[in-house]
Image (cartoon, rainbow, N blue to C red):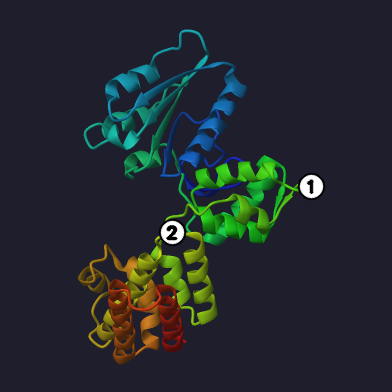
């Protein structure tokens, strides 16, 4: 049985689809479970949920942990098949399971999954699980971060109410995500701090501005989205907020502008040549066409000459910045206006 899960406020995830033998909630009836993904907070949440379900069904349980980087597959499976000495049930947890379940050992786990021991629940936790035949035989739950800020803000609002007992204003949640990013571990930590500062059970955006520092690593995608949105005011507001709340971000912002202009120029030039998207991405040094999806969508709005104008403006801005000519913040705002004029 295989399940896909996404983060929720209470347990840390909720089902978004399932296939296989059964599709119930994670509980005491499942004997072989894989938690896959880089969101450690979500993995801990689901592990805690499983432990509580097992305790409710069996009373005290034996807990055994293995490090997948050092463990031996045969020893782990022998432990799963052996009887517990004291408790009625065992929970065997393997961290970094992708290091244990490899091509040579995967058949061993597949055979075990065909007839798992009823006295043991095997939990594999992995940040880089490789799908295969085993996935159809066990419960696989993906523990990953949200991909969009709006989802993270909505989760923060629910989590603040359900786990911390206060109302987080939507605008405050948006600012919280903008400052910390989409890591649930960081969001949970900041939500706990904000609980101490809640005024009559409510936290507004001013509290977030005062108490939450800027820890989010600057990524190019939000700026690219704003530059291609055709709204210069919104793009400039994003640039100013980033510069005011983060240190040493002028060069990364300028690099994001130049990278986008380069992608736009390549995409507009490639249109009449009918170059496949994947090949174009490779020529641009990207892993796949996902990294130029925004430029591909905007390319029909531009001619190669217009895209070339943007690229020249970015190159000139980069040269001026490195030479100490002008103010970088004003240069970035000028580029935002130029992008908006060309992609509307």
**Spatial distance from mark 2 to mark 1, Cα to Cα?**
34 Å
Q: Which residue is mark 2?
A: 247
In this rendering, the answer to whether 120 lies above or below 156 is: above
Q: Position of residue 17 (x, y in %)?
A: 51, 50
Q: Position of residue 287 (x, y in %)?
A: 26, 62
Q: Residue at x 36, y 88 (%)?
A: 302
* In this picture, residue 119 sits left or right of residue 74: right
Q: Sequence order check: which comes first, mark 2 or mark 1?
A: 1
* In this picture, residue 212 sits left or right of residue 283: right
Q: Position of residue 4 (x, y in %)?
A: 48, 47
Residue 264 appearing in the image: no
User: Are there few (<14), some (14-19), or many (20+) residues within 10 Å of tag 1?
Assistant: few
In this rendering, the answer to whether 344 lies above or below 122 is: below
Q: Nearer the viewer, residue 76 or 96?
A: 96
Callout in the foreground (2, 1): 2
Residue 61 appearing in the image: yes
Residue 107, image quadrant:
top left
Q: Residue at x 62, y 42 (%)?
A: 193
- Is disc 1 placed on a helix, strand or loop? loop
Q: Which residue is mark 1?
A: 200
In this rendering, the answer to whether 70 lies above or below 146 is: above
- Is disc 2 placed on a helix, strand or loop? loop
Q: Nearer the viewer, residue 84 or 93?
A: 93
Q: Position of residue 226 (x, y in %)?
A: 48, 74
Quadrant of the snapshot with the N terminus: top left
Q: Nearer the viewer, residue 1 or 316?
A: 316
In this rendering, the answer to whether 337 lies above or below 175 is: below
* In this picture, residue 338 sits left or right of residue 68: right
Q: Residue at x 37, y 86 (%)?
A: 300
């Amino acid at each position: 049985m295989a399940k896909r899960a996404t983060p929720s406020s209470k347990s840390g995830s909720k089902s978004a689809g399932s296939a296989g033998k059964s599709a119930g909630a994670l509980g005491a009836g499942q004997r072989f479970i894989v938690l896959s993904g880089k969101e450690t907070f979500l993995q801990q949440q689901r592990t805690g949920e499983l432990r509580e379900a097992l305790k409710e069904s069996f009373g005290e349980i034996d807990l055994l942990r293995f490090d997948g980087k050092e463990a031996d597959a045969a020893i782990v499976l022998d432990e799963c098949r052996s009887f517990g000495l004291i408790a009625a049930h065992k929970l065997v947890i393997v961290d970094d399971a992708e290091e244990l379940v490899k091509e040579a050992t995967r058949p061993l786990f597949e055979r075990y999954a065909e007839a798992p021991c009823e006295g043991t629940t095997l939990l594999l936790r992995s940040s880089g699980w490789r799908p295969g035949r085993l996935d159809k035989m066990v419960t696989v739950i993906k523990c990953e971060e949200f991909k969009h800020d709006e989802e993270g803000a909505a989760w923060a609002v629910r989590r603040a109410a359900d786990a911390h007992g206060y109302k987080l204003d939507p605008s405050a949640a948006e600012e919280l995500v903008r400052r910390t990013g989409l890591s649930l571990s960081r969001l949970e930590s900041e939500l706990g701090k904000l609980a101490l500062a809640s005024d009559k059970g409510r936290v507004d955006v001013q509290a977030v501005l005062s108490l939450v520092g800027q820890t989010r690593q600057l990524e190019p995608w939000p700026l690219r989205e704003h530059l291609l949105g055709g709204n210069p005011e919104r793009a400039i507001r994003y640039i100013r907020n980033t510069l005011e709340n983060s240190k040493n971000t002028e060069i990364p912002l300028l690099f994001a502008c130049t990278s986008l202009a380069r992608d736009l120029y390549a995409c507009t030039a490639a249109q009449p040549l009918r170059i496949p998207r994947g090949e174009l991405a490779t020529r641009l040094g990207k892993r796949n066409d996902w990294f130029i999806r925004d430029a591909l969508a905007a390319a029909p709005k531009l001619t190669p000459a217009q895209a070339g104008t943007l690229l020249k403006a970015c190159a000139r801005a980069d040269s001026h910045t490195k030479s100490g000519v002008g103010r970088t913040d004003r240069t970035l705002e000028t580029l935002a206006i130029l992008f908006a004029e060309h992609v509307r």
